[in-house]
Image (tube, rainbow, N blue to C red):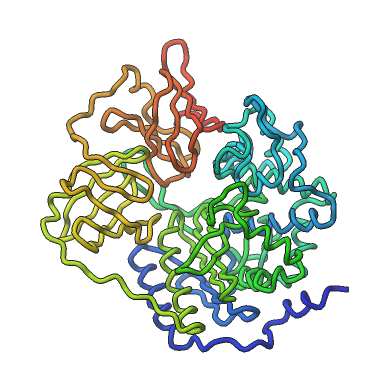
């Protein structure tokens, strides 16, 4: 017999009264439609959760309320819940060493062992992707083959040393769920999480989706010549199923959020959830807990996760003390910045209606002499080219068209597909600017000499046509376009080996595999091999 808490959670509505959101909804819907029009997003679904009530759920454009989306790394929250269920049952131990036979070699002297706690909080030292079943691999190898490919590699950094986001780390945690439970990961999730929550529009594998349920999606694919084309996103099961393969409707993700607001909703004990919502292996107040990203939203503690997966950008954010949550799903690739704007508008609306909190809008600033900011720049990770167009400062930041809204003298908010209101501040003499953790410095556009001979043999396109690695040269540096997202600046270690900068693949390497004549027909990009196109 199911626990009473789970039976209540499966009902369409709960008995607790919710705030009146009717005055905020039109403003929120205007933001959704504005983002869709301005950034070419075909479909969006939004849900607002007030404790045990989904007080609003709606689809826009190509999406309906019941449309199924790929939710990407929101999967990691369900994965972590599964791990904690088995920890509570005594079948798994967060701090016991993971079986060395499942892991890459550990080359670091006196390094601590890899543990489940590290895997769930991205502190294990594992690479971001696996050789087989990586994000770039459309062959659908399954979880077992994907995790087995780890054995051929080595740890990138010492366990516990630093936070390095890892899809294969989360997948290995999911594989340990399989080993401990004796069930395939998708089967475990269906029996132990989906069924108790009453999820009807969710599945972990394509073959289990309701027919016609998955909304179509689009990708902006780099063409290898500095431009972009649009195409329908491919559909295949990732090898890293526990890390990013969940398909779900906005309503089903909202039900999961309600369970979390009910101190786990009977899925896990409240004390387990409290540990999951505590940043791990760090003194920082914000960071990765167990599966969950822990942060702040206007002074309120927030937990949740975002997702980005072939043709979809998603987010779920929960404010535990305010007892509210927001889910935003979009059928557009690499649009996290735009999802963030919708999410921010939704959370703001909920806090205003429920707690009377308002947020002062940023005052407009009439900037002058914008031409002095125009030019070419380079940071430790990216390049940027800025110019003035129709009286506004705009630019291209390592492949992402970006708009700069002035907020003060030399200060702007940057918006792009990946950034939402990111603070920008120029040096007084306009010789550089900061954007997030990146420090850009002005460069001479004529300084294009390659710093080493032979690099011309590396230039070109490698890998699948829907997500190629593009190697280009700019300002005497090589760059690698990854995941149709940004050009990453490469730092040479030797003639053929280059280190990736701060970002998605920090501390990992790209190796150009050349024949005796110096011709490069293949690369090893962070443990994943790609042939030249």
Residue at 66% across / 56% down in the picture?
Answer: 206
Q: Position of residue 124 (x, y in %)?
A: 63, 40
Q: Residue furthest top?
A: 516
User: Compared with residue 98, is residue 78 higher up or lower down, i.e. above or below?
Assistant: below
Depth check: give the residue in front, 282 or 233: 282
Image quadrant where residue 441 sits: top left
Residue at 32% across / 57% down in the picture?
Answer: 423
Is 278 positioned to the left or the right of 94 in the image?
A: left
Residue at 69% across / 47% down in the picture?
Answer: 117
- Quadrant for the C terminus, please: top left
Depth check: give the residue in front, 328 or 91: 91
Image quadrant where residue 105 sits: top right
Q: Position of residue 365 (x, y in %)?
A: 20, 67
- Quadrant for the N terminus, please: bottom right
Q: Position of residue 386 (x, y in %)?
A: 22, 48
Q: Residue furthest left?
A: 369
Depth check: give the residue in front, 325 or 526: 325
Is 451 positioned to the left or the right of 196 in the image?
A: left
User: Compared with residue 425, is residue 499 higher up or lower down, i.e. above or below?
Assistant: above
Report the label total.
0
Q: Residue furthest front?
A: 283
Q: Position of residue 61 (x, y in %)?
A: 45, 72
User: Compared with residue 160, is residue 406 higher up or lower down, i.e. above or below?
Assistant: below
Is 214 positioned to the left or the right of 189 in the image?
A: left
Is 368 positioned to the left or the right of 314 in the image?
A: left
């Amino acid at each position: 017999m199911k626990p009473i808490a789970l039976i209540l959670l499966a009902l369409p509505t709960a008995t607790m009264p919710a705030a009146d959101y009717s005055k905020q909804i039109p403003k929120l819907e205007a933001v959704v439609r504005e983002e869709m029009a301005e950034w070419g997003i075909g479909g969006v679904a939004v849900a607002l959760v007030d404790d045990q009530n989904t007080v609003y759920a709606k689809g826009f454009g190509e999406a309906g309320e019941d449309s199924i989306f790929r939710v990407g790394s929101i999967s990691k929250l369900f994965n972590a819940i599964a791990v904690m269920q088995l920890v509570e049952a005594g079948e798994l131990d967060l701090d016991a060493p993971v079986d060395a036979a499942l892991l890459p070699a550990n080359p670091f002297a006196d390094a601590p062992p890899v543990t489940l706690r590290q895997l769930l909080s991205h502190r294990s030292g594992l690479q971001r992707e696996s050789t087989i079943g990586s994000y770039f691999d459309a062959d659908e190898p399954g979880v077992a083959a994907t995790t087995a490919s780890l054995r051929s590699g080595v740890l990138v950094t010492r366990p516990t040393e630093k936070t390095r986001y890892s899809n294969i780390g989360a997948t290995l945690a999911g594989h340990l769920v399989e080993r401990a439970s004796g069930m395939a990961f998708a089967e475990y999730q269906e029996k132990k999480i989906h069924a108790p929550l009453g999820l009807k529009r969710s599945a972990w594998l394509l073959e289990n989706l309701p027919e016609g349920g998955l909304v179509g999606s689009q990708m902006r694919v780099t063409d290898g010549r500095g431009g972009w084309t649009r195409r329908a996103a491919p559909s295949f099961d990732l090898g890293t199923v526990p890390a990013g393969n969940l398909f779900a409707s906005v309503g089903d993700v909202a039900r999961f959020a309600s369970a979390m607001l009910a101190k786990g909703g009977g899925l896990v004990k409240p004390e387990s959830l409290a540990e999951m919502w505590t940043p791990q292996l760090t003194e920082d107040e914000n960071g990765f807990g167990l599966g969950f990203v822990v942060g702040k939203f206007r002074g309120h503690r927030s937990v949740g996760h975002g997702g980005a997966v072939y043709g979809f950008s998603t987010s779920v954010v929960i404010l535990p003390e305010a007892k509210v949550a927001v889910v935003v799903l979009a059928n557009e690739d690499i649009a996290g910045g735009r999802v963030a704007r919708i999410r921010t508008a939704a959370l703001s609306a909920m806090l205003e209606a429920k707690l009377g909190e308002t947020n002062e809008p940023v005052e407009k600033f009439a900037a002058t002499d914008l031409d002095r900011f125009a030019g070419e720049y380079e940071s430790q990770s990216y390049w940027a080219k800025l110019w003035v167009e129709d009286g506004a400062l705009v630019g291209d930041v390592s492949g992402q068209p970006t708009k700069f809204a002035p907020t003060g003298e030399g200060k702007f908010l940057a918006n792009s597909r990946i950034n939402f209101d990111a603070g920008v501040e120029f040096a007084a003499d306009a010789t550089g600017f900061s954007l997030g953790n990146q420090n850009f410095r002005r460069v001479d556009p004529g300084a294009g000499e390659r710093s080493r001979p032979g690099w011309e043999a590396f230039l070109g396109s490698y890998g699948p046509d829907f997500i190629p690695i593009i190697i280009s040269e700019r300002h005497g540096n090589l760059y690698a376009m990854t995941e149709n997202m940004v050009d990453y600046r490469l730092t040479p270690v030797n003639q053929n080996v280059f280190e990736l900068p701060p970002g998605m693949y920090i501390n990992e390497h790209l190796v150009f595999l050349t024949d005796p004549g110096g011709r490069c027909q293949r690369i090893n990009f962070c443990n994943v091999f790609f042939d030249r196109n």
